[in-house]
Image (spheres, grey):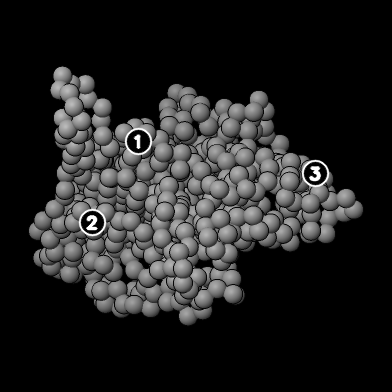
């Protein structure tokens, strides 16, 4: 990108020389060196006896033989499994807390470290496989030779009750990553005789949030950030999802115990058919996928393109009340004075998927209620007597919004403070050291909106001279739901792309994604349409490009290009 420079020189040639020099100066980011492989120096038992780190207790160190773990029917190589806890303490609620973790150290190490950000509200130590991205993964960081850590983010509760302890909130929000990272690197140095040459962090959903938070709070600790479907404004998204449930409940005839009665599966399928009629061919071919989502938002109109019911609901129409409620959800749920709470959601071909319906109909009561009431709001709801349905349908959205921004003497950081990245549209510390960011997000994600992630990326670009693509890229995944699934090509590997960019300077462009039809080694996606090839491929294009059809077999990525 050229800068306009005032100078006493005149003439086109002189101006061109200055512009070229300016471009070269701004484009020259540091190039990080590649990681160097090494074999483990100590046995698993020796690691246990030789490692010490402040506030850390190892509970077990054992050897895992090749093939004891598998991924996509492939054997994971031999490694040491280290489990332990950091910062054990008694919470103000009288419960025991610690940051539980497991770390897997391959015998043949590639010189890299991967922090696995887990989903939901954490609370359990997931197997440290280092899943890369997309649905039905065919590879992972551990399989590729990374040392991988996974944690419970500071609590062992599977529910939201840990939110009654202020420190547990902070560990979940951001401090667990900051505490675990130096310990993990020290453990690696003990095992291999050197620390990691390159460090990566990644995850989807809350794991994507962890990664974005790390990019702003711990930019010097990691060289590559793999951000999947990030809930980086999670408290707002949860409140907005509750607001969506309230809108569905307002539709006449809706059963509050079954919100799907507000907008049935048949009605959703009809809506998707109408979206496809208006938007499918905007990318040059009718293939059941909306690639040009921006054009689709202006091409489809729910009030104009969907018939209004005149004699009852039969799946071929929507009532005026349905159109109003659904339209408000997709344009973005607001407070009583019309202020947007979170983000809009794009009209897309995956919005009739079972996963989407689950997020919209069941999750507001089952998960969002407890998370908002006990983790994100100040003060938290009492431990006893909480009823999710009562909270959703009898608490005003305005009150929820106020309380996720609130703090007090005990809970000194609001939900929106401890859960979100700091100044996420800046990230100069990541850029300036030569680190890289790859993000992906499904266009039919029902809980964390692609629109929110696009707004982040465009803000990042604006603050970097109008173009952040020299250190950060965003890959929308058409029709994919939350992290995976949907009538989509949702199987892809961005970790390999990220490593090549960080360590070799190989900037990623189109990334090939596959459908997971019958016979897929990573697991079959039952939402792949029957008229697709089981192995359909598509290029994922970095925003703002979209995949457009050129010519050839519509089942092959090679028939499309990013434009």
Find residue 98 and name its label. Answer: none
Q: Which residue position is annotated with label 1?
A: 466
Q: Is residue 162 visible?
A: no
- In this view, the residue farthest toward the bottom is 519
Q: Which residue position is annotated with label 3?
A: 320
First in sequence: mark 3 or mark 2? 3
First in sequence: mark 1 or mark 2? 1
Q: Looking at the picture, does residue 398 appear above or below residue 218?
A: above
Find residue 506 and name its label. Answer: 2
What is the secondary structure assignment of the residue under circle 1?
A: loop
Q: Residue drawn 51% across and 43% down?
A: 451
Q: Position of residue 324 (x, y in %)?
A: 74, 41
Q: Is residue 549 visible?
A: yes
Q: Which of 93/377 is in front?
A: 377
Q: Position of residue 190 (x, y in %)?
A: 13, 57
Which of pointers 3 and 2 indicates the residue nearer the eye?
2
Label 1 to label 3, Cα distance in Å? Answer: 42 Å
């Amino acid at each position: 990108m050229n800068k306009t420079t005032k100078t006493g020189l005149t003439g086109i040639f002189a101006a061109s020389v200055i512009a070229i020099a300016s471009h070269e100066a701004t484009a020259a980011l540091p190039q990080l060196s590649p990681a160097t492989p090494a074999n483990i120096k100590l046995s698993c038992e020796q690691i246990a006896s030789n490692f010490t780190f402040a506030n850390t207790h190892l509970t077990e160190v054992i050897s895992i033989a090749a093939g004891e773990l598998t991924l996509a029917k492939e054997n994971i190589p031999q490694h040491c499994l280290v489990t332990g806890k950091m910062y054990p303490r008694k919470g103000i609620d009288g419960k025991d807390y610690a940051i539980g973790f497991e770390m897997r150290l391959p015998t043949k190490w590639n010189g890299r470290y991967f922090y696995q950000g887990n989903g939901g509200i954490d609370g359990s130590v997931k197997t440290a496989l280092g899943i890369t991205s997309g649905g039905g993964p065919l590879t992972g960081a551990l399989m590729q030779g990374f040392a991988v850590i996974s944690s419970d983010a500071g609590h062992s509760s599977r529910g939201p009750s840990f939110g009654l302890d202020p420190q547990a909130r902070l560990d979940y929000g951001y401090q667990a990553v900051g505490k675990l990272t130096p310990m993990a690197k020290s453990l690696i140095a003990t095992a291999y005789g050197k620390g990691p040459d390159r460090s990566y962090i990644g995850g989807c959903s809350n794991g994507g949030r962890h990664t974005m938070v790390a990019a702003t709070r711990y930019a010097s600790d990691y060289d590559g950030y793999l951000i999947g479907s990030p809930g980086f404004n999670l408290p707002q998204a949860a409140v907005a999802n509750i607001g969506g449930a309230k809108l569905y409940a307002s539709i006449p005839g809706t059963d509050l115990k079954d919100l799907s009665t507000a907008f049935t599966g048949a009605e959703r399928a009809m809506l998707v058919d109408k979206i496809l009629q208006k938007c499918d061919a905007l990318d040059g071919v009718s293939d059941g996928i909306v690639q040009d989502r921006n054009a689709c938002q202006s091409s489809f109109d729910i009030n104009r393109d969907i018939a209004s019911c005149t004699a009852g609901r039969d799946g071929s129409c929507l009532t005026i009340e349905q159109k109003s409620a659904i339209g408000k959800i997709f344009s973005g749920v607001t407070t009583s004075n019309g202020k947007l709470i979170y983000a809009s959601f794009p009209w897309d071909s995956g919005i009739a998927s079972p996963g989407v319906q689950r997020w919209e109909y069941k999750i507001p009561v089952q998960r969002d209620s407890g998370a908002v009431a006990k983790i994100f709001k100040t003060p938290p709801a009492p431990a006893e007597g909480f009823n999710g349905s009562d909270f959703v349908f009898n608490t005003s959205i305005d009150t929820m919004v106020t309380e996720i921004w609130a703090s007090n003497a005990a809970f000194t950081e609001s939900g929106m403070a401890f859960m979100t990245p700091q100044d996420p549209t800046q990230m100069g510390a990541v850029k300036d050291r030569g680190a890289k960011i790859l993000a992906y997000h499904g266009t039919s994600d029902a809980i964390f909106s692609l629109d929110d992630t696009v707004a982040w990326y465009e803000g990042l670009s604006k603050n970097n001279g109008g173009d952040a693509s020299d250190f950060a890229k965003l890959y929308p995944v058409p029709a994919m739901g939350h992290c995976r699934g949907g009538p989509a090509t949702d199987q892809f590997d961005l970790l390999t792309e990220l490593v090549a960019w960080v360590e070799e300077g190989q900037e990623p462009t189109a990334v090939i994604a596959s459908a997971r039809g019958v016979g897929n080694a990573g697991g079959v996606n039952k939402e792949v349409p029957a008229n697709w090839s089981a192995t359909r491929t598509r290029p994922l294009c970095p925003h703002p490009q979209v995949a457009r059809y050129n010519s050839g077999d519509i089942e092959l990525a090679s028939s499309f290009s990013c434009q």
